[in-house]
Image: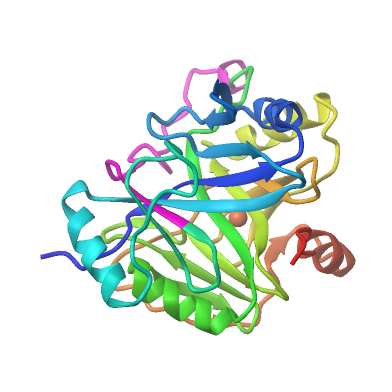
Amino acid sequence: MHKLSVNHLCGYGLEVPDLKVASDFYSAFGLRASIEKDRLLMHSAHEGPAELIAIQGLEKRLHHLSFGIYASDMSKFEEHLKKIGTPATASPQKGLREGLWFQDPWGTWINLTPTTVIRNPSENLTVPRVDRHLWRELPKEIKPNRLGHMLMFTQDWEKVEAYYCLALGLKVSDRAAGKVSFMAGGSGVRDHHCFGLINSTHRGFQHSSFQVNSIDEIGLGAMQMQKAGFTDGFGIGRHALASNLFYYTRDPWGSWVEYYADMDKISDSWQAKDWNELPYVWPQWAPEFWGKEMNANHERK
Ligand SMILES: [Fe+2]
């Protein structure tokens, strides 16, 4: 019998002051937009629930998290959530996402939705390049494969980490000591993290990250955003923890959305550690940017 755990991050919800602004930004990023009632749904190339649901609000604010579970675990999660004192309840808005809804003890809405487990077997496969023109094979338009992870600012960092491990079966895969907790769901070979917590003064959306196939697709994605007028970004680079290649583009409300590729995979024998390394191996360390721009919590308390 498998341990009760979410499998991966399915999506997230944001309240935004202008749905058109959200649609323009995420469409330029390579997601597909559709409108359902008064909500904006954004999808990557992956077939499944909308990765982002944007809802009209007064200002940009994290609205909810959504994790994928096995359909056969629905009733087990329902019992488990009740037992730990955060029982499933009605959705905060009718028809928002399928599955269970509950709030963590700090008020964040969480959805558990039955989905198939995401595996990307083609990742990291290198096809020999003989008698080919790679430059002619590169995509003209970057459309990310899937949502990979999201990081959330939080107060009570250690308590929130303990709760998310207990409630969702997430396992810490590594920590930037005292600052960031990276967490993986499910079992078997999977991404180093699908969710993370950043120690902060209050809750908020820090960044979401979508998987693409290569460093070329990250570079072309960066160009795509710059051409569309979203010129504020950081990278390309290679992270330390999780080792993924990255480029961050700034969303219209000050937060970040990342293209990533080539992330470390972990198995069930992976051991978490606390690290004191810089967040990336290259480019050169930019303390001002990393402290004030990347890690500023842009949401009201
Ligand atoms: Fe990331």
The quarter of the image holding the N terminus is bottom left
Q: Is residue 133 left or right of residue 172?
A: right
* Rendering coords of residue 138 (x, y %): 59, 22
- Is residue 87 found left or right of 18 in the rendered image? left
Q: Residue at the spot x=81%, y=62% of the render?
A: 284
Quarter residue 53 falls in: top right
Prevailing SS of the magenta stretch:
loop
The residue that appears at 21% across and 68% down in the rendered structure is 3
Q: Nearer the viewer, residue 160 or 101?
A: 101
- Up the image or down, 140 lies above or below 6; here it is above
- In the picture, measured across the screen, residue 131 lies left or right of residue 24, that is left
Is residue 259 visible to the viewer in this orientation of the structure? no
In this view, the residue farthest toward the right is: 288
| Region of the chain picked out in magenta, as a range | 110-138
In the rendered image, residue 14, in percent from the top left (x then y), is placed at 63, 45
Instruction: Classify 1 as above or below 13.
Output: below
Membership of 126 in magenta stretch: yes
